Image (tube, rainbow, N blue to C red):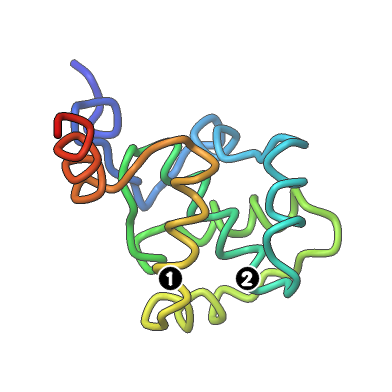
Amino acid sequence: MPLVSDTAYPRLEINTSAMEVARFTPTPAEIAFVRRRARQDGVRLALLVLLKSFQRLGYFVAFEDIPPVIVEHVADAVPGLTNPATVLADYQTSTYRSRLTSLVREYAGVAAFGRLVLLCHKARD
């Protein structure tokens, strides 16, 4: 029987296995993207955590729903990043979150549903 995390609507489990945590290891290209797009460590960590969770799940989740072990793993994988888990909570309620999600969409090459529908209608006209 498949795990809930492997179904059509995957979720991040609180008791995350080491194999699952390893899936969140950023690639050199992802690290370079984050360094180009963000200057502060807190923003870099938030962007990278959003990117990796979006890649794994296919949708954006609240920072508070991402297990701390994953945040720590992502922070440890990038030299110079600290692990300010409390900083992520600040980005959850700020306008910065929408900017970060836009950057993730740009990197992933996807569009928000509303924009996609709008673009399709314009293309038909």
Per the image, label 2 sits on a secondary structure element best described as helix
**Residue at position x 74%, y 54% from top?**
76
Task: Specify whether 70 is left or right of 40.
Answer: left
Mark 2 is surrounded, within 10 Å at the Cα level, by few (under 14), some (14 to 19) or many (20 or more) other residues, namely many
Would you place residue 105 above or below residue 49 in this image? Answer: above
**Residue at position x 50%, y 45% from top?**
106
User: Which of 115 and 39 lies nearest the eye of the viewer?
Assistant: 115
Dot 2 amino acid type: Val
User: Which of 70 and 119 lies nearest the eye of the viewer?
Assistant: 119
Per the image, label 1 sits on a secondary structure element best described as helix
Q: Earlier in the sequence, mark 1 or mark 2?
A: 2
**Residue at position x 36%, y 52% from top?**
14
Distance from Cα at disc 1 to Cα at disc 2: 10 Å
**Cβ–Cβ below 8 Å for labels 1 and 2?**
no
Task: Specify whether 104 is left or right of 124.
Answer: right
Residue 92 coordinates in the image, percent (x, y): 40, 75
User: Which of 38 and 53 lies nearest the eye of the viewer?
Assistant: 38
**Residue at position x 70%, y 47% from top?**
33
Q: Please identify the quarter of the rendering in which residue 22 is found.
A: top right
Circle on res. 43:
2
Quadrant of the rendering where the C terminus is positioned = top left
Circle on res. 97:
1
Dot 1 amino acid type: Arg
Residue 112 coordinates in the image, percent (x, y): 28, 48
Q: Please count the marks in the image.
A: 2
Task: Specify whether 69 is left or right of 116.
Answer: right
